[in-house]
Image (tube, grey):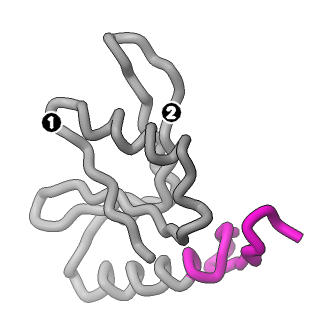
């Protein structure tokens, strides 16, 4: 049994942590094929910097572009919205320009 009772799911040879995340990937693939989004990436890794010092990294679920704007998405449930996640998200929002994480419930 997984920590959050999620079920790992494989789509297109990619293993996702949950069915919800795999379903969101399928939606994003359709949007990319329709030309609504572009450059879809899974598991983007962003360094966490505080006072010019790297303190770790944030790994989102998806990154893509819409009209030149970078979108970072994280598929969440109430139990996966942990204190560590919230701190990492707030650090990203302090960047110049800020990085906002779009939460998908």
Q: Nearer the viewer, residue 81 or 11?
A: 81
Image position of 95 (left or right of 42): left
Q: Is residue 10 above or below residue 46?
A: below
Quarter of the image with the N terminus is bottom right
* Image coordinates for residue 83, horizontal then vertical, percent: 54, 45
Q: Is residue 25 above or below residue 84?
A: below
Q: Which residue is mark 2?
A: 57
Query: Could you say which quadrant of the image residue 22 lies in?
Result: bottom right
Which tag, 2 or 1, sits closer to the chain's start?
2
* Image coordinates for residue 39, horizontal then vertical, percent: 32, 62
* Image coordinates for residue 60, horizontal then vertical, percent: 47, 53
Residue at screen point 76% across, 77% down: 7
Q: Nearer the viewer, residue 83 or 65?
A: 83
Quarter of the image with the C terminus is bottom left
Q: Nearer the viewer, residue 14 or 72?
A: 72
The magenta span reads 1-22
Residue at screen point 15% across, 57% down: 69
**Residue 17, magenta (yes or no):** yes
- Disc 1 crowd rating (10 Å Cα; few below 14, some 14-19, many 20+) is few
Residue at screen point 54% across, 71% down: 77
Query: Could you say which quadrant of the image residue 9 lies in?
Result: bottom right
Q: Which residue is mark 1?
A: 97
Q: Which numbered tag is attached to residue 28?
A: none
* Image coordinates for residue 94, horizontal then vertical, percent: 24, 32
């Amino acid at each position: 049994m997984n920590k959050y009772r999620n079920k790992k799911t494989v789509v297109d040879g990619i293993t996702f942590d949950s069915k919800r995340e795999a379903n969101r990937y399928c939606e994003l693939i359709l949007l990319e094929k329709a030309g609504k989004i572009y450059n879809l990436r899974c598991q983007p890794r962003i360094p966490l910097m505080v006072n010019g010092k790297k303190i770790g990294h944030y790994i989102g679920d998806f990154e893509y572009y819409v009209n030149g704007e970078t979108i970072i998405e994280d598929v969440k449930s109430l139990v996966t919205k942990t204190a560590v996640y919230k701190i990492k998200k707030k650090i990203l929002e302090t960047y110049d320009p800020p990085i906002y994480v779009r939460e998908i419930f």
